[in-house]
């Protein structure tokens, strides 16, 4: 972070400071409310202002593409729920530390934790895959609860000061090792698996240089990295599901490993396995569509042109 600050221009550093001050004000405001009131208040706020933002159009296009049979009132209902969920996540962020202590058991129904504990005891590394659903930070908190040595991957924020604050929040709820995406992060992930540690990655968003795999009936560029890691290191490819049950309460489930294709053609095997991952992501979205992060441009740019 220090090196990035040195390389940045004066105007950039000033902008970072202004944004970080705004971040601190937001965090302090919601921190004093307690997690339940903060979740409710931020959810209500974003349900009202989210539809006024430009990203509403992206989310609507995505939903119409995935649910062509849905009438506009249903799409509107789902969009409102999506904004409320994202607002709740924002309100919960300053309180993530509660998920490091005994309150985790009160707020999270954790199904399948024995799978991670068994891997921990056996020294079996896993490639865990998640998605941007409900409050996805709870997935990392759940992994940390089991004591499984795991590198949690993340995309660094553009503002290095805010990135540091977010990283501190994650450490506060129990994450031992954070690995930033990128060239150096990829090396660290490989080294972790060789050393017998697990890795956790998101696998539900567009990757421009990924591979085209079916997603809701349309080809979608998808990251093959988790699949390749599991193949190369002979690790189980384990999906982790997070669902918001009510307010700031959740259900986390460690699911059966996704079957890795044994096709002798390696490229075909990767595509088949990535397709299975997309099928899992799609099935999770269908269970609670309003809890997924629909504002992401999942398909090619021309899909979103007017």
Image (cartoon, rainbow, N blue to C red):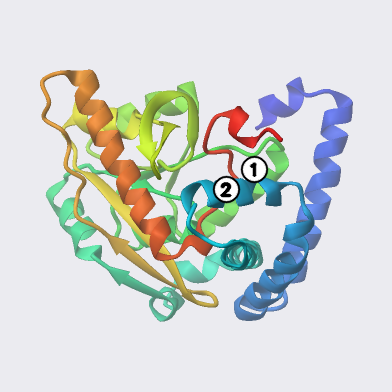
Picture coordinates of residue 234, whole percent (x, y)? 16, 33
Which residue has dot 1 on it? 163
Front residue (pair 44, 300): 300
**Mark 2 = which residue?**
167
Depth check: give the residue in front, 248 or 287.
Answer: 287
Front residue of 204 and 98: 204
Residue positioned 52% across, 34% down in the render: 299
The x, y position of residue 19, in whole percent, is 81, 46
In the picture provided, is 75 more to the left or to the right than 54? left
- The disc label shown at residue 55, or none: none
Residue 24 relative to residue 81: left or right: right
Question: Is residue 137 placed above or below 163 in the rendered structure?
Answer: below
Q: x and y percent of residue 176 in the render?
A: 42, 49
Q: Nearer the viewer, residue 17 or 280?
A: 280
Q: Which quadrant of the rendered structure holds the N terminus? A: top right
Using residue 269 as the reference point, say whether residue 179 is left or right of it. Answer: right
State which quarter of the image contains the C terminus: top right
Q: Are marks 1 and 2 in contact (CB under 8 Å)?
A: yes
Q: Residue 201 location in percent, x, y?
A: 40, 41
Asked which quadrant contains residue 45, the reply is bottom right
Please tell me whether residue 119 is drawn above or below residue 193 in the rendered image.
below
């Amino acid at each position: 972070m220090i090196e990035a600050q040195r390389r940045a221009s004066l105007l950039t550093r000033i902008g970072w400071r202004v944004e970080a001050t705004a971040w601190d004000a937001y965090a302090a405001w919601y921190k004093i409310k307690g997690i339940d009131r903060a979740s409710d208040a931020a959810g209500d706020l974003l349900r009202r202002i989210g539809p006024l933002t430009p990203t509403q159009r992206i989310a609507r296009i995505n939903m119409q593409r995935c649910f062509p049979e849905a009438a506009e009132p249903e799409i509107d209902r789902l969009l409102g729920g999506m904004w409320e969920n994202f607002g709740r996540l924002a309100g919960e962020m300053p309180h993530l530390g509660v998920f490091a202590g005994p309150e985790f058991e009160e707020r999270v129904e954790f199904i399948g934790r024995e799978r991670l504990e068994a891997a921990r005891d056996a020294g079996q590394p896993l490639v865990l895959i998640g998605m941007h659903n409900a409050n996805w930070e709870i997935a990392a908190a759940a992994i940390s609860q089991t004591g499984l040595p795991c590198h949690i991957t993340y995309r660094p924020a553009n503002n290095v000061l805010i990135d540091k604050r977010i990283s501190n929040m994650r450490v506060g709820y129990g994450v031992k090792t954070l690995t930033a995406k990128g060239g150096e992060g990829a090396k660290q992930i490989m080294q972790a698996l060789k050393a017998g540690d697990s890795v956790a990655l998101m696998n539900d968003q567009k990757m421009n240089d990924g591979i085209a795999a079916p997603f809701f009936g349309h080809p979608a560029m998808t990251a093959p990295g988790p699949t390749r890691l599991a193949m190369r290191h002979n690790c189980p490819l384990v999906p982790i599901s997070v669902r918001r049950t009510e307010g700031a309460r959740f259900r986390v489930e460690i699911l059966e490993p996704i079957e890795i294709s044994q096709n002798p053609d390696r490229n075909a095997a990767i595509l088949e396995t990535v397709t299975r991952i997309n099928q899992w992501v799609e099935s999770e979205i269908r269970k609670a569509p309003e809890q997924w992060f629909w504002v992401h441009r999942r398909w090619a740019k021309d899909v979103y042109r007017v």
